[in-house]
Image (spheres, rainbow, N blue to C red):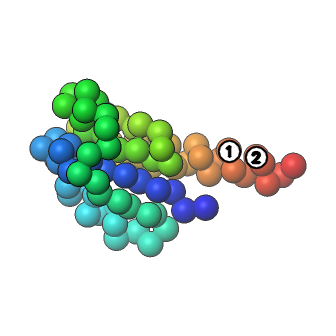
Amino acid sequence: MRPIIEFCTNNMHHGTAKLLQQLEQNPEYDVIEYGCLGNCGECYLAPFALVNGEIVAAATAEELEAAIQLKIKEIEDMLDLFKDE
């Protein structure tokens, strides 16, 4: 299952535009940019994205990239557990 990574246009002032463009280059991800994700409090405070519908946030865009990769790994590990059953 390909992870869905969603970005808010209003969060780009935190430096997430470059990260969005970078993740779009990976054919294993579905990367979507919306005008608003409805998480205005989070959007104002820090760089964030939704990964399969879950908020992933960090202090910087660089840290957000690492957090997104970690969340994707967690999701893949969980899916692997279900495959073994």
Checking the image for residue 59, the label placed there is: none
The residue shown at (29%, 57%) is 33
Quadrant of the rendering where the N terminus is positioned: bottom right
Residue at the disc numbered 2: 81
Front in this rendered view, residue 75 or 9 = 9
Badge 1 local density, few (<14 within 10 Å), some, or many (20+)?
Answer: few
Q: What residue type is labelled 2?
A: Leu
The residue shown at (47%, 56%) is 4
Give the CA distance from mark 1 to mark 2. 5 Å
Question: Where in the figure is residue 44, as x and y percent of width and height?
Answer: 19, 31
Mark 1 lies on a secondary structure that is: helix
Question: Where in the figure is residue 84, as x and y percent of width and height?
Answer: 83, 52
Residue at the disc numbered 1: 78
Horizontal arrangement in the rendering, residue 84 relative to residue 26 (left or right): right
When the figure is inspected, residue 27 is found, relative to residue 60, above or below; the finding is below
Quadrant hosting residue 10: top left
Q: What residue type is labelled 1?
A: Met
Horizontal arrangement in the rendering, residue 76 relative to residue 36 (left or right): right
Residue at the left extreme, as displayed = 13
Mark 2 lies on a secondary structure that is: helix
Q: Is residue 30 visible?
A: yes
The residue shown at (69%, 50%) is 79
Question: Where in the figure is residue 43, as x and y percent of width and height?
Answer: 24, 35
When the figure is inspected, residue 59 is found, relative to residue 21, above or below; the finding is above
